[in-house]
Image: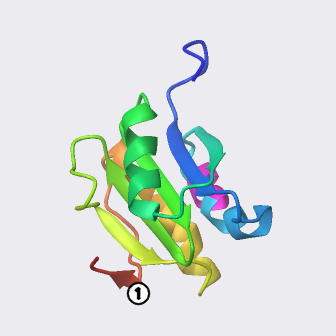
Amino acid sequence: MNNDSPPSIRLHANSAISEQQLAEVLLGIEEEGIPVEIERFDELNPLVLAHQAAISSRLGIGIGMALDYAVITTEKLPEARPYLTTWLNTDADIDRAIGANAARMVKRTPLRPMSGERNP
C-alpha cells in the first residue's frame, strides 16, 4: 500500500474472480465517491479476504470476493463475524449495493437494502 495514495476501501478478490464479476461492485463504490484499491489472491475464503482487506485499508473497511460470495467487514470485527455477507453475481443491483454499502460505511450514511443478504 502506498501512503501517498488517498485512503481507500480495499477489495481483495480471489484470482478466479473476473473483471466482469467485479464491475458492478466497483461501480457502487465509485457512485459513492470513495477510492478503492483492488488486489488479487489465491485465497478461496471470502471471510479471510475481507478481513485482510479491512486491516490493510487506511479507512478500515474491506471487501472480500471469492467463490459465490462477497463479504464486507471492518478492521474491528473478528474474521469469522463480518458486517455483511451476500451472494455474488446473482443480481446487478445487489452487486452494486455491495460496493455502495462499503462506501457508505466509510461515510457513515444509511446502507442500501440488499435482498440477497445472508448470515454466515
Residue 28 falls inside the magenta stretch: yes
Q: What is the basis of the colouring in this image?
A: rainbow
Mark 1 sits on what residue?
Answer: 115
Residue 44 falls inside the magenta stretch: no
Q: Is residue 31 visible?
A: no
Query: In the drawing, does residue 46 fall left or right of residue 81?
Result: right
Q: Which amino acid type corresponds to the residue marked 1 in the rendered image?
A: Ser
Query: In the drawing, does residue 66 fall left or right of residue 55?
Result: right
When asked about the image quadrant of residue 102, the answer is bottom left
Q: Is residue 93 visible?
A: yes
Question: Residue drawn at (47%, 53%), measured in percent from left and top?
Answer: 49
* Mark 1 element type: loop
Magenta stretch prevailing secondary structure: helix
Question: Residue drawn at (41%, 87%), measured in percent from left and top?
Answer: 115
Q: Nearer the viewer, residue 83 or 24?
A: 83
Image position, residue 67 (x, y; %): 57, 74
Q: Nearer the viewer, residue 27 or 72?
A: 72
111 shown above or below 108: below
Residue lying farthest top? Answer: 4
Image position, residue 40 (x, y; %): 65, 48
Question: Residue drawn at (59%, 87%), measured in percent from left and top?
Answer: 90
Image position, residue 56 (x, y; %): 44, 32
Q: Nearer the viewer, residue 42 or 35?
A: 42
Q: Which residues are magenta?
A: 26-30
Question: Residue drawn at (37%, 36%), measured in percent from left and top?
Answer: 55
Image position, residue 97 (x, y; %): 50, 69
When asked about the image quadrant of residue 26, the answer is bottom right
Which quarter of the rendering shows the N terminus? Answer: top right
